[in-house]
Amino acid sequence: MKRMLLVVLMVGLLALTGLAAKTIGFSVSTLANPFFVTMKEGGEAKASELGLKLIVLDAQDKPETQFAQIQDLITRRVDVLIINPVDSDAIVSAVLEANAAGIPVITVTRPSNGGVVAQHLDIDNKEAGMLAAVAMAEALDGKGRVAILEGIPGAPSSVDRQAGFMDEMKKYPGIEVVASLTANYSREEGARVADDILQGNPVLDGIYAHNDEMALGAVRSAIAAGRLNEIKIVGIDATDDAIAAIKAGEMIATVQQQPYLQMEMAVIAAQRIINGASVEPKVIIPLKLITIDVLE
């Protein structure tokens, strides 16, 4: 009886002194994309290591679903919110609600265009586009016809990956961008849009996609058209499928942005906030160009 009473008293004391496990809510745009699955896994591993509870909710690329899920996390009084926005504008109302509830917010990969955010973790998306352009230009020896598969219209990552690529391409007047169409970061849409591009361009030397999912869709389309050998395909993310495609000779390059590390760092920042420490307002994750030479 005394032993049971002691256990009860200890549990109560932990709760009263705030030593019970703290909770982080992670609202992710979609788990249909392997990039964000890797991000989730990194967060779960780091949270477990630090003795934190991580609740992960998948918005399935729907802003209204993400808003409702974040409202649920606010109601559950999570200690910190980590948000990977579906849309940088649409997420603002949810961030403002978290601010009003006194729950600190961290954003990853896509920023919020309003509200108070304690820390944003991202890559330099312009640099990612530039690295992709360098890989494409080298593979084409500075001349050829290239098409682009763009991400979500208006998303900061899409805008910057396009700008970085196009700025670097100014150095290569022998390369012409003949088409640039949206495929919403989706493999299925990437394949469908690439089908249209291939049909409209009997001569095409390269396809740059703003992410690997669209690049892999382009690979599928090029294989179906019997044109993979003539088209150099470059993506961004360095997902497992993209790495396998490079090894198989189906893609020539991808840009690694380390989603596992990014989410680990976000969880560490959340712990610092919980402990009352300050965090840097913006953290840039280093990039690396991945080609067959790097993998061999």
Image (cartoon, helix red, strand yellow):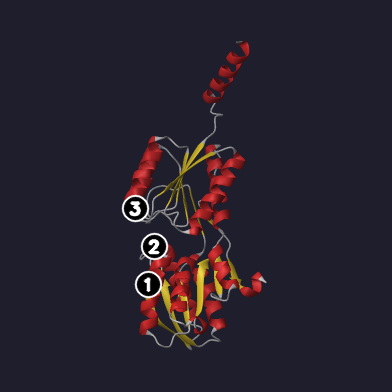
The residue type indicated by label 2 comes to Ala
Measure how far apart labels 2 and 3 are at the Cα level: 13 Å
Measure how far apart labels 1 and 3 are at the Cα level: 24 Å
Q: Pointers 2 and 3 in contact (CB under 8 A)? A: no
The residue type indicated by label 3 comes to Pro
Residue at 58%, 73% in the rendered image: 248
SS at badge 1: helix
Q: Which residue is mark 3?
A: 63
N-terminal of the pair, mark 2 or mark 3, is 3
Looking at the rendered image, the disc whose residue lies closer to the viewer, 2 or 3, is: 3
Residue 96 makes an appearance in the image: no
Disc 2 crowd rating (10 Å Cα; few below 14, some 14-19, many 20+) is some
Residue at 45%, 37% in the rendered image: 78
Q: Which residue is mark 2?
A: 155
**Residue 192 badge:** 1
Measure how far apart labels 2 and 1 are at the Cα level: 21 Å
